[in-house]
Amino acid sequence: MIDFSHANSSKQFQKQMRVADDVAQQMINGERAIIGVMIESHLVEGNQSLESGDALVYGQSITDACIGWDDTDKVLRQLAAAVKQRRG
């Protein structure tokens, strides 16, 4: 199980995309030890603070910064294709 966030992406949510590229390539190359991933993902990328006093953005994290829906869709499709190749 690989956590795309935190140490693997230096706590910079945009770097999860690079981690996804690397993991997908490992799977395409036949790596069988990868059994799953954890992705910091939400509808709207980034995060927001409850203490700022600003109106909250629907679908944006109030904890860890996340990739948004479009990037999540891309990553899931990329990983699914890598699994298919690994199995094929």
Image (cartoon, rainbow, N blue to C red):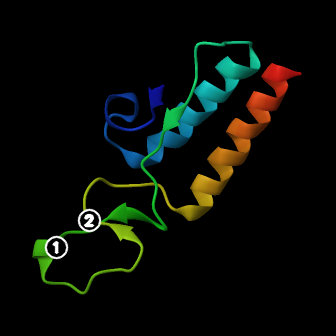
Specify whether 52 is left or right of 18: left
Residue at point 28% right, 81% down?
A: 56
Mark 2 burial class by Cα count in 10 Å: few <14, some 14-19, many 20+: some
Seen in the picture, residue 55 relative to 13 is either above or below; the reply is below
Furthest residue toward bottom: 55
Whether residue 78 sits left or right of residue 21 in the image: it is right
- Determine the secondary structure under disc 2: loop
The relative height of residue 32 versus residue 68 in the rendered view (above or below) is above
- The residue that label 2 is drawn on is 62
As drawn, the residue found furthest toward the front would be 35
**Residue at the image point whose x is 26% and y is 68% from the top:** 48
Left or right of 5 on screen, residue 74: right
Q: Nearer the viewer, residue 10 or 77?
A: 77
Residue 61 against residue 11 in the figure, above or below = below
Which residue type does callout 1 highlight? Leu
- The x and y percentages for residue 78 are 71, 41
